[in-house]
Structures are given as C-alpha cells and as structure tokens.
Image: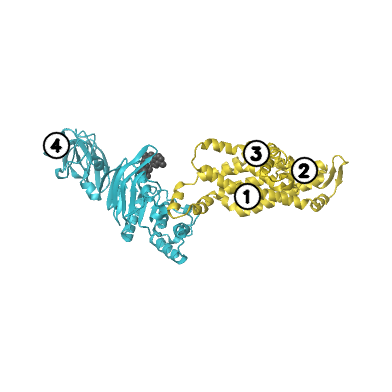
C-alpha cells in the first residue's frame, strides 16, 4: 500500500514562501515524477513527504492516515538521495543492512533480504567493499538496495541519476523502471530532466515556483499541455511558440507547434512558412534544423528525417501540421 | 614529482630543511646521551668521568621512578579521556544553530590562549585555595569543610587544570570535523529508523574517528611533557611528580646532570612506547 495525499500543503522558509497551498494525490503503485526547473521546490516537496521538513500548514496523509506529525522513520517511506548518502565507513553489505539493523530484524531474515536485493541489483560481488571503492552507478545501486530491503510503501528518489554519465543514466533509468514493474510499489521521482520524466512516469507533475502547472500522463502532457510553460517544458526539442499575426489568424494569442510536426520542403507550398536554414544538428535518425528569418519567431526548430539534408543558408518552406496546433490565450492558458 | 629529474631536484631542495631539522634534533639528543654516561655534577666537582650505565641503574632503582611513570600516564590518560568525551559533546552542542554562535565559539577557544603558568595560578589561587578560593566559599556555603584540593586531591586537580586548557583545542578540531559531515547522511539514517543515539554511534562517531585520532596524538605529545602546571601548583609533591618533573628535579634541584640525562633517555623511551601503542590502536584511522 502507498497512497499519498497532500492537502493544502504549504511551506515557507522564514518569510520566503516556497510552496503555496498545494493539493496532490499519488495513487498506490503509481510512478509519479515531479519535474520543473531548478529551484521550483521539487526537493522541498519530496522532503515534506518524507518528513525531513515540517509543513508550514496543511496535511499529508499516507494510506488515509494523517502522517503530518509522524517522524520520517515511521512513515514507511524510503528515500534515495542525489548524493546517495551512503555511510562511507560501512561495507556495502552493512549499508544495505543498516535499516534492518535499526529495525532489530532477526538475522536470518536480514540475510535473506540483503541477498535478494544484492542479486536484483547485481551487487553480490561487491558486498564487502566500501562505498569509496565503487563506481557512481554501483553506489547508486547500493543506495537503491538500502531502500528496497525495507520493503517500504513508497520510494522517494531525489534526482538519483544526475551524478551519472549519459550512458549510465539511460541504463539506470531502465533499471529503475524495471524495478517499479517488478515491485509495483509507489515511486515518487524528482528530476529536472524532462526525458527522464517522459520515459519513466505514469504521472507527471509539472511544477513552477512551487505551483503545480499540470498533472497528467506523459502523453496527456505532450498532446494537451494546459499552458505555455508546460508546452515549452515537455518535449524535446522544445515546442515552437509563435505570437503575433500568425497566431491571430488562429484566433489565439500564442500558437504552439512541435518541431516534429513541421515538414520541410524546398518548394513553395500553400500555407507554408518561408525561412533560412541556420544550424542543423544531425542525430543520424533525425536531423534538427534551426530555421531563421521566418518572421514568426527568432528561431523555429524543426525535426525531420535523418535523410533530409539542407545546408546552412538554404531557403526552405515549413509546412506545419494544422491538426496538432496548440492554441493559448493571452494568459498562456490553453484554448480548448 | 614523476620524473627522475624532478625527484632528484626535489631531494636537493628539501635537503637544507632536512639537515637543519636533523641537526636540531640530533645535537640535543646526542648531548643527552653523552651526559647520561657521565658523572657530571656542575656545582660539586663538575665532570667526574665516565660511569657506564650507573646513572640509568640509579634512575630506575630510585623509589620515585615508577610512581613518576604512573603519574605521567595517569595525567595523560585522564586529560585525554576528559577532553575527548567533553570535546565531542561540546562540539555537538556548538554545532547546533544558536544565537550568538560566533561569539560563543570565540569565547570557547579563549582558554587555549592563556599561558599554562597563568591558568594554573588562576586555578590554584582563585578556585582551589582552601581559604579564599571560590570552591572553598562554595563548600562553606553548603556548610561543608573546604577541600584542600592540591594536597588532598592533587592528581585530579592537576588533571582538571590541564583539561580546562586543552578542552577548547579538542572541541575546536572536533567541531570542524562535525561540520564536514554530509547532512544527507544523517537524514538518510533518520529515514532508516536510526534513533538520535544510534545516529551518533553509527554515523557521527565513525565520521569523527580521524579527528579524534589527531586530537589524541597531538595532545599525547604535549601532555607527556607537561610541566608548568605542576611547577606552579604542587611542585611535584602529593604524587604529582611526573617523569618530566623528576628529571627537572634531578638536574636542577640535585644538580646531577648525568642522572637527569639518563632520565631524559627513559622519557624518550616512554614516549615511544606510548606512541607505538597509540599508533597500533588508532593509526589505521589516519589512512585515507
Ligand atoms: N533550508 C532552506 N532555507 C531557505 N530556503 C530554502 C531552503 N531549502 C530550499 N530553499 C529554497 O526553496 C526553493 C526550492 O528549493 P528546492 O531545493 O526544493 O528546489 P528544487 O526544485 O529541488 O531545485 P533543483 O532542481 O535545483 O534541485 C529554492 O528557491 C530554495 O532557495
Ligand atoms: Mg533539488
């Protein structure tokens, strides 16, 4: 079990209000990702749920029990920190065993759980090493192992992959997703990397300055962003946001079109936007063109097939797919 | 310093310092050894020739030798115990955020800047004096007979005086060590269900082990040769005669340089035994 509910939760540090009243429900077994720019209060929110910070007002309930006043250890949640926070003077095995020892679990059960966790995380060969003798990815796995053995009702991850190199990050991302499939335990995962959010989440919570901008599944956020902030934040490369005359044609203040929803043509087509190719990024499978001089915005990003090739300075025409155009009003809110 | 060339250059450049330090150590050491084999009484005939190991035999067989070793070890051990235990507790306390932290920390280190002679005199005259001392007044206020600290409880009194001076040193080093502890580790332990006591035992204390080792070694070096505090209080009477003090008495009070030098050699041996002992126990904490 692990349903977590936040009711009108606020948090201030001194007179700085980091989180204005916020409501959120995370269902049992869900993989929920908090995403947002740096300093928007993701870690603070996670620490409030963990109990490492006290809420200024509001309540937090876990499985319908008010947990606002319950100390962190008693909430049945396990946390994986960005710095891993392994105990440097203990072996990997002792690190993983620590929560069990603190719970005074019997020795045989401890051994069984440690062995199971070590096997699941490929740590069996490293059990006698100290954290200092492990690579970043292995340390990350030890931190996860220490969380798993407690069999918590929910896992909290605070940017667990941000210290890893790109290749390892992709690997660990899959491992964590795999783990979630296997354990079916609630996971709350903080990141500022929207790719991580999109690939792992059942539910994404987009935060800006402590305020929830939108909650939804990755595809909901991708297809129906509620405002320009979410539109710009979710999806890579970023959505093109166009204001002015072109937007007015669609009776909107701003229109948004994703780079992958624009096709490039060398010939003039009806309704196409003319432009000049700037930098192009060849990814092999795709090519991303940065197009200038369209008169719409500084730069329009276009993603097209890897085969397509235009040179810097080529004149081209951009054909947007009108059926996937996003429209926003003057406040940046979506128009139906 | 990887290449052959840079290594030999480095050796050349370090040579002056090494030679100077070696000379600095070797000259007094050789002179001590030299005198320890002589009967040398400056005011009673001067150099009276070689006597072999006579001085050593006399120094060890004197009735005050073993008690002095014992007093030395008791003082070193007692002060270490008090400063480390209280030092850790005070460092934990000073690490808590509080009002006027900066001032409190400076006040705290102040005793260490007071010269040992002065601090010992202050303790002797202002606190421990059986007639006018603050302790005497306190005892009288409760209707008790004032204690003659420096004669009735001489060793504990001296340990107290020395500890008062060394406590800030230990606290300061331990405080900086505590401040370098990653707070996420403590939070992780808290989430793992560790009580405050368990967090102290399993996280903070192991983290402090290196700092504790440093304090232990540095203090031992200085405490083995403690002198001023004894000189201005008990003058070595009432069982407070340490090895250092005994040597001082042999050389200056009895004017027997040879005997004192032999004592000096014993002091070196004692210091080395203690050092080896300590390194065996705690030295591994210093390995990175
Ligand atoms: N202990 C504190 N005292 C005062 N302000 C704080 C404290 N902790 C966080 N803040 C402020 O709260 C805001 C949110 O911080 P938080 O660490 O939650 O951001 P974040 O979303 O996790 O950012 P990042 O992606 O950089 O980790 C920041 O503006 C920060 O300055
Ligand atoms: Mg953060």
Label 3, on which residue? Answer: B17
Query: Quick check: do tags 3 and 1 share a chain?
Result: yes
Colour applied to chain B = yellow
Q: Position of residue B160 (x, y in %)?
A: 66, 45
Q: Which of marks 2 and 3 is in front?
A: 2
Query: Residue placed at 48% from the left, 58% from the top?
Result: A94
- For the residue labelled by badge 2, is the local secondary structure a helix, a strand or a loop? helix
Location of residue A50 with respect to B122 vertically, above or below = below
Categorize mark 4 by other alpha carbons within 10 Å: few (<14), some (14-19), many (20+): some
Q: Give the chain letter at badge 2.
A: B
Query: Quick check: do tags 1 and 4 share a chain?
Result: no
The answer to whether the residue labelled 2 contacts the one labelled 4, judged by CB atoms less than 8 Å apart, is: no
- For the residue labelled by badge 3, is the local secondary structure a helix, a strand or a loop? helix
Earlier in the chain: of badge 3 and badge 1, it is 3
Question: Real-space Cα distance between discs 2 and 1?
Answer: 27 Å
Q: Give the chain letter at badge 1.
A: B
**What count of labels does the image hold?**
4
Query: Residue placed at 85% from the left, 49% from the top?
Result: B51
Give the quadrant of the N terminus of chain B: top right
Question: Real-space Cα distance between discs 3 and 4?
Answer: 84 Å
Label 4, on which residue? Answer: A251
Ligand 1 lies in quarter: top left
Q: Write down which chain is painted cyan.
A: A
Label 1, on which residue? Answer: B81
């Amino acid at each position: 079990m692990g349903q977590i509910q936040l009711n009108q939760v606020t948090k201030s540090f001194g007179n700085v209000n980091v989180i204005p009243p916020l409501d959120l429900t995370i269902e049992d077994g869900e993989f929920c990702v908090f995403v947002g720019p740096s300093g928007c209060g993701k870690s603070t929110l996670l620490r409030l749920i963990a109990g490492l910070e006290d809420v200024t007002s509001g309540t937090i309930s876990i499985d319908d029990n008010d947990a606002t006043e319950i100390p962190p250890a008693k909430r049945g949640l396990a946390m994986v920190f960005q710095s891993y926070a392994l105990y440097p003077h203990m072996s990997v095995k002792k690190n993983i065993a620590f929560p069990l020892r603190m719970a005074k679990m019997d020795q045989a059960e401890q051994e069984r759980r440690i062995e199971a966790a070590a096997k699941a995380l490929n740590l069996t060969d490293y059990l006698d090493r100290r954290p200092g003798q492990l690579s970043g990815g292995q340390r990350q796995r030890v931190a996860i192992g220490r969380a798993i053995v407690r069999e918590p009702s929910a896992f909290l991850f605070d940017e667990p992959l941000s210290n890893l190199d790109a290749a390892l990050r992709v690997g660990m991302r899959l491992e964590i997703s795999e783990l979630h499939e296997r354990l079916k335990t609630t996971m709350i995962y903080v990141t500022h990397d929207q790719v991580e959010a999109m690939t792992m989440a059942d539910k994404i919570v987009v935060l800006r300055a402590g305020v929830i901008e939108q909650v939804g599944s990755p595809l909901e956020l991708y297809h129906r962003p509620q405002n320009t902030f979410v539109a710009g934040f979710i999806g890579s490369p970023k959505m093109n946001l166009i204001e002015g005359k072109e937007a007015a044609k669609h009776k909107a203040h701003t229109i948004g079109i994703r780079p992958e929803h624009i096709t490039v043509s060398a010939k003039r087509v009806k309704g196409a936007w003319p432009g000049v190719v700037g930098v192009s990024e060849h990814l092999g499978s795709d090519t991303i063109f940065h197009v200038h001089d369209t008169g719409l915005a500084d730069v329009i990003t276009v993603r097209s097939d890897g085969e397509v090739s235009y040179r810097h300075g080529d004149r081209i025409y951009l054909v947007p797919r009108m059926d996937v155009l996003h429209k926003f009003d003057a406040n940046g809110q979506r128009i139906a | 310093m990887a290449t052959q060339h840079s290594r030999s250059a480095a050796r050349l450049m370090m040579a002056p310092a090494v030679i100077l330090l070696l000379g600095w150590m070797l000259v007094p050491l050789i002179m001590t050894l030299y005198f320890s084999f002589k009967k040398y009484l400056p005011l009673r005939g001067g150099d009276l020739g070689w006597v072999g190991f006579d001085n050593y035999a006399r120094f060890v067989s004197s009735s005050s030798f073993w008690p002095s070793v014992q007093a030395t070890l008791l003082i070193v051990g007692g002060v270490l115990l008090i400063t480390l235990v209280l030092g850790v507790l005070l460092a934990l306390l000073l690490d808590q955020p509080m009002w006027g932290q900066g001032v409190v920390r400076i006040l705290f280190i102040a005793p260490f800047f007071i010269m040992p002679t002065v601090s010992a005199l202050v303790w002797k005259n202002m606190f421990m004096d059986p007639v006018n001392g603050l302790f005497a007044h306190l005892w009288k206020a409760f209707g008790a007979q004032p204690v003659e600290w420096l004669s009735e409880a001489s060793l504990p009194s001296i340990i107290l005086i020395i500890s008062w001076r060394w406590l800030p040193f230990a606290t300061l080093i331990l405080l900086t060590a505590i401040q370098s502890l990653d707070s996420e580790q403590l939070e992780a332990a808290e989430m793992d269900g560790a009580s405050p006591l368990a967090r102290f035992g399993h996280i903070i204390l192991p983290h402090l082990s290196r700092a504790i080792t440093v304090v232990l070694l540095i203090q031992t070096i200085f405490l083995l040769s403690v002198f001023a505090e004894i000189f201005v209080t008990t003058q070595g009477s009432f069982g407070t005669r340490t090895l250092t003090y005994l040597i001082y008495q042999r050389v200056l009070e009895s004017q027997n340089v040879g005997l004192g030098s032999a004592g000096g050699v014993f002091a070196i041996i004692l210091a080395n035994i203690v050092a080896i002992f300590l390194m065996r126990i705690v030295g591994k904490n210093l390995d990175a």
